[in-house]
Image: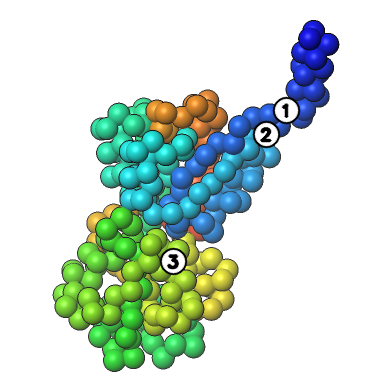
Amino acid sequence: MFWRLSRLIALVLALPAGAAAQPLAIAAASDLQPVLPGLVAQFESELRQPVRVTFGSSGNFFSQLRNGAPFDVLLSADIEYPTRLIADGKADGASLYTYAVGQLVIWSRSNAAVEVERGLAIVTDPAVTRVAIANPAHAPYGRAAMAAIAAAGLTAQVKPKLVLGENASQAAQFVQSGNAQIGLLPLSLALAPALAAAGRYWPVPAHLHPPIVQAAVILRASRHQAAAAQFLAFLRRDAVVRRLAESGFLTPGGTR
C-alpha cells in the first residue's frame, strides 16, 4: 500500500505545474465571443490554470446560478444580474468589477438592399421585413434595442418584424444568414471578422437607451476562489482593458 501511495505522489509531482488544476468555469455574455477566447488563452498560458468558458445570455445564466449552476465567475452584459446575485447571497459583493460598457449598432449584410446609414428609421423601410434582436426577456442588448426603438417612436412599426435570438450571438446569426435584413447587435460582434467582412453597421446613439454596463462577479459557491480572483485581476490589466476597447467596448469611464 505504501508503494502505491508513493507512486501516486510521484505521478502527481511529475505533472507540469497546473496540469492537475480543475478548470475555472466562466459563464460569459455572448458579446464577448470575439475577444474572450484569446484573453483566456493568454491567462491559461501565463498562470497554468485551465479555463472552461460557456457563452450565453446573461439572464439565462442568472437563473441557472440562482439554482446552483456550477460556475465560478459570471461575466454579465448587465451589472443588474451580478448585483441581484450579490443581494441573493449567491455572489461575493467585494469581487464585483465593471469591466466594460457595451455599444449597440444596427448591422446589415453588404448585399442587402438596406441603407443602415439611415439609422433606426430604416426599420420602416418596406425592404426590411425582419429585425433581429436578442430576447429582451433575458438579454441586456435586447432590452437596450427595445429602449432605443421606443425612444425613436418606432415600437409599433418594429414589433411585427421582430425576430428574437436566444442571445446576441444568435441574433447576429439571423442577420448574417439572411433570415433578417437588419439586426440590433453589440458592436463587438459587428467588428468580429465574420460580420466585418460580410456587412456594415451604424452606431445607435447611446442616449437612446440605458448604458450597457457590463460587470463580473465571483460566485460564493465556487470551489476555485483563488483562481477566480486571479482571473478578475487579469481583467483589470491595462493591456486587457485596451484589448476590450479595440474589440468594440467602452471602458467603464466611457472611452474606447
Q: Which mark is residue 208?
A: none
For image coordinates 58% across by 47% down, the residue present is 39
Q: Return the x and y of residue 182 as percentages of the image width and height.
A: 38, 79
Dot 1 lies on which element? loop
Q: Return the x and y of residue 204 as percentages of the image width and height.
A: 32, 69
Residue 64: image quadrant is top left
Query: Mark 1 and mark 3: span between their CA atoms?
Result: 38 Å
Nearer-the-camera pick, 133 or 216: 133
For image coordinates 58% across by 51% down, the residue present is 37
Colour pattern: rainbow
Check the picture and name the quadrant holding the N terminus. top right
Q: Which mark is residue 48?
A: 2
User: In this figure, which residue is indicated by the disc labeled 3?
Assistant: 170
Q: Return the x and y of residue 205 as percentages of the image width and height.
A: 29, 67
Q: Earlier in the sequence, mark 3 or mark 2?
A: 2
Query: Mark 2 and mark 1: span between their CA atoms?
Result: 7 Å
Nearer-the-camera pick, 72 or 208: 72
Task: Say which of marks 3 and 2 sits in front.
Answer: 3
Nearer-the-camera pick, 155 or 208: 155
Q: Name the kind of residue labelled 2 in the image.
A: Arg
Q: Name the kind of residue labelled 3 in the image.
A: Gln
Q: Earlier in the sequence, mark 1 or mark 3?
A: 1
Pointers 2 and 1 in contact (C-beta within 8 Å) = yes
User: In this figure, which residue is indicated by the disc labeled 1?
Assistant: 17
**For the view shown, which residue lies furthest in the top direction?**
2
Mark 2, other Cα within 10 Å: few <14 / some 14–19 / many ≥20: some
Task: Say which of marks 1 and 3 sits in front.
Answer: 3
For image coordinates 38% across by 47% down, the residue present is 61
